[in-house]
Amino acid sequence: MDLKNIIEKRKVKDGKHSLVLEVKLDDFKRFDSEFSDELGAQIVNQHLYNNSDDGRATNVTVELPDKNKIVRIYSDISYEGNDHTNYGIH
């Protein structure tokens, strides 16, 4: 997955971390023409892995493109009790 054109937004509220990745529609469609939370989870996990981020993604949802043709992927990120995360990538 080529994930160089992703915009990352993070926030922490009451100790809970959340992440939003913004991807151009054309870039997203290179991976799949369907919008699914499973594909969103793969993209989030790859993004975390590429950035050596040890968080674990949960509650991943994909928001359909807006008028600017941007797909948003929302995720909660957990850091509590994490050992080094493998992401299932070999």
Image: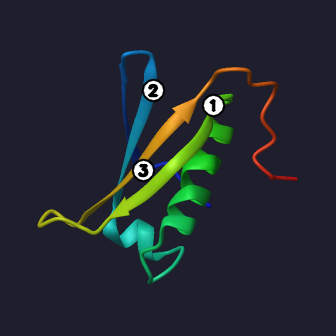
Asked if residue 1 lies left or right of residue 73, the reply is right
* Marks 1 & 2, CB-CB < 8 Å contact: yes
Q: In what element is the residue under mark 2?
A: strand
Q: How many marks?
A: 3
Q: In what element is the residue under mark 3?
A: loop
Residue sitting farthest toward the left: 67
CA–CA distance in space, label 3 to label 2: 22 Å
CA–CA distance in space, label 1 to label 2: 9 Å
* Residue 17: assigned label: 2
Q: On the image, which quarter does residue 64 sit in?
A: bottom left
Residue visible at 81% across and 52% down? 89
Amino acid type assigned to the residue bearing label 2 in the image: His
Which sits in the foreground, 28 or 64? 64
In the displayed structure, would residue 58 be above or below residue 24? above
Residue 5: x %, y % from top left: 42, 50
Give the number of the mark in front: 3 or 1.
1
Which sits in the foreground, 52 or 2? 52
Amino acid type assigned to the residue bearing label 1 in the image: Gly
Residue visible at 44% across and 82% down? 34
The residue wearing badge 1 is 55
Residue 74: x %, y % from top left: 39, 48
> Quick one: label 1 or label 2, which is nearer the N terminus?
2
In the displayed structure, would residue 86 be above or below residue 12? below
The residue wearing badge 3 is 5
Assess disc 3: are there few (<14), some (14-19) or many (≥20) residues with their C-alpha within 10 Å of its C-alpha. Answer: few
In the displayed structure, would residue 15 be above or below residue 54? above
Amino acid type assigned to the residue bearing label 3 in the image: Asn
Residue 44: x %, y % from top left: 55, 49
Asked if residue 1 lies left or right of residue 76, the reply is right
Assess disc 2: are there few (<14), some (14-19) or many (≥20) residues with their C-alpha within 10 Å of its C-alpha. Answer: some
Q: In what element is the residue under mark 1?
A: loop
